[in-house]
Image: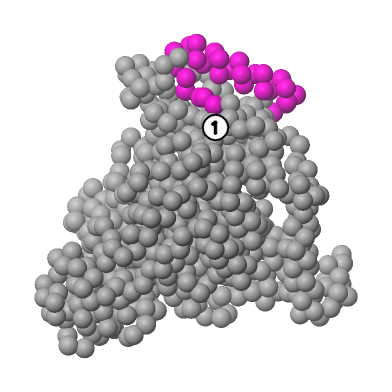
Amino acid sequence: MEPPRTGWQLNLLGPGRLVAASGQALQVGPKLMVAMAYLALEGPTLRMRLADLLWPDVPEMTARNNLVQLLRRARQQLGVELISGTDPVVLDPDLQVDTRALARHSLHGGIDDRLVHDEGLLSSLEVEPGSDLADWLSAQRERLDEQRLVMLRREAERLEDAGAYAQAALRVEQRLRLDPLSEEAHRRLMRLRHLMGDREGALQAFAACRAILAKNLRTEPLPETLALATEIARGGQLPEVRARAPGGPRLARVPGVVGRTEAWAPLEAGWQAGQLLLITGPPGIGKTRLALEFAASKGRVLRVDARPGDAGTPFATNTRLARAHLALMPDVPLPVWVRDTLSRYLPELRGPAPPAPVRSPEAFQRAFDAQFELVQATSAGLAAIVVDDLQYFDSASLAVGNALISRAVPFHAGPIPPHIAVYRAGELTPEQAAVLDRLVQEGVAARVDVGPLDTRAVEDLLRGMGLPDTARLAPRLQRFTGGNPQLIYETLQHLLDLGALHDPPEHLPLPPAVHDVLNRRLDRLSNSALQVVRAAAVLQSDFTPELVADMLGAPLFDTIHAWEELERAEVLLGTQFAHDLMLEAVRASIPEGVSRLLCRSAARLLERHDGQASSIARFWMDGGDPREATTWFMRAGEAAAAQFLLREAAAFYALAADACDAAGGADRVAASRAPT
């Protein structure tokens, strides 16, 4: 069966349409269209989930058989295999899907008029109200509409900035067809029509706004909308419609690694010996960049980051590692025992029965074996695996990693690619330090310490940036920053912002600490961007625009708009902080009362999203509610005990006791839980 070739298109916005490369629209039944839509929007999906969604009222085996027959008929009818894989199943990546294009435009800019029509996701599909499919469609339609609103708002702002008021007004009118209750969009349309010289049109836009609000919400427009209408009617000066997001030229990073010749040689020696490579040094010194540059010199690289907050949740880092490997080969065939073992911390792999609790050391050992099998099965074509921020590893993941490395070295003799681990000097726990020290002593690992740049290396760095008078600036910059590449970059960027980069003052105008530099950047953020980044800093790890919006109770498209500002300011890079120093600066900037409020919001968020009990407990504790923390620490202990993590379980129970004491004792906690 031939796979789809470039040019096949799946249009989900509107009634749903599959178009072959020839341009012919093909007849596709509603169940196949729903299956393709679900896979396009949700990604790889277990057959059980897809069958249950399409046939909710029939026995499981019948539903599974129906799915098999549906996919077989689709292959025969279309002559291509659009849906493949054993379990999970996936949509062919060569298929062009309009919702994927919409997501790209929403996050990265641009607009496509084919994506902004009024019809929603599979608009002609009739489904049973209250069913899982109906709920899923409703949620996805809302999410996709929000993406279209973001795209239209950004384009309207761009056109207005360029003075193209008529075109901007058309984009705002498209926004209002999708979201007629957006008073902000009504105000923008009023303003744009006024700027076009169409005073009557602006007042008609106000009248339409008032009528829609009265009909749907039984309310009057906001005072600012009324004030704008008054100014338009009087022909007065209009207020600014929005604060312009901060922006400006950014320094280009120098390609390659500067000043790391001495570090490269021992890395090469360790690589040739098949050892685990450990790269360590202080924050901002360039450890990760060195690791990635070295690994890339060998071929294709997989990078996985541990995150702040992992340490308190068993298998948190390993879960991220396992998902990164599965993303490389979503259709990888895994033995049943491997899937069952991994499903303890990867719920997407679970079958109809929940995984059995771990009740023996032998059963716990199977987690090591399953991870080894997964890495071995998904590493074809990988030259190296880089694991960053090892200091954040939780102890269970560290044990799994230690077992994998011990079995895999020397790397070049087996099926596991060489590993490079990066961590901050002085930030390992005693347990982590002992594990790594033992690996080095046994010759399993080679450790390379990365130090500050010397004056010559700083001069090479400045020369690579194309800066003038590097011989004079380099020694001063090296002394000022201590040779820390990240602080060098931040200092130069601030000089650029001040217009003093090419003629810096004799005394550099920055304080002698990176947090002060980063706080200046934070001060330039809008209020909405500051709220978003503070919420992300409280969550610390695995945050997304959707989670942050939920945590703040804010519209998703407003959160995405703030996210874009944070990326332009290089505070965030995707769903991570630009660097750990930035995370620390943001956390230090949060007032204590605001921090407690955000922690409580984070706890409720994770409760809604089935988060780890240990994380929920810590957020309740940091949020000043030890009574709630007691309950969740107990649940964390029970979960750890069920996985035979007895040391972790004991630690969680001890934290529950401390929280209970802080709450005023067991009787008081029990009383607070009693029904009234």
Examine the rendering and report whether any part of residue 281 can be seen: yes
Please give the count of numbered marks on the rendered protein.
Answer: 1
Mark 1: few/some/many CA within 10 Å (<14, 14-19, 20+): some
Classify mark 1: helix, strand or loop: loop
Picture quadrant of residue 570: bottom left
Residue 196 vertical placement versus 112 (above, below)? below
* Residues in magenta, as a range: 56-85
- The residue at the point 33 percent across, 59 percent down is 265
- The residue at the point 35 percent across, 22 percent down is 5
Q: Is residue 384 magenta?
A: no
In the picture of the structure, the residue carrying the numbered disc 1 is: 332
Residue 72 vertical placement versus 384 (above, below)? above
**Residue 223 locus on image (x, y percent):** 42, 69
**Residue 152 locus on image (x, y percent):** 34, 48
Examine the rendering and report whether any part of residue 201 can be seen: no
> 272 or 605, which lies in front?
272
Left or right: 241, with 413 as reference point: left
Callout 1, which amino acid?
Answer: Val
Q: Is residue 72 magenta?
A: yes
- The residue at the point 61 percent across, 61 percent down is 394
Residue located farthest toward the top when viewing the structure as drawn: 76
- The residue at the point 29 percent across, 73 percent down is 453
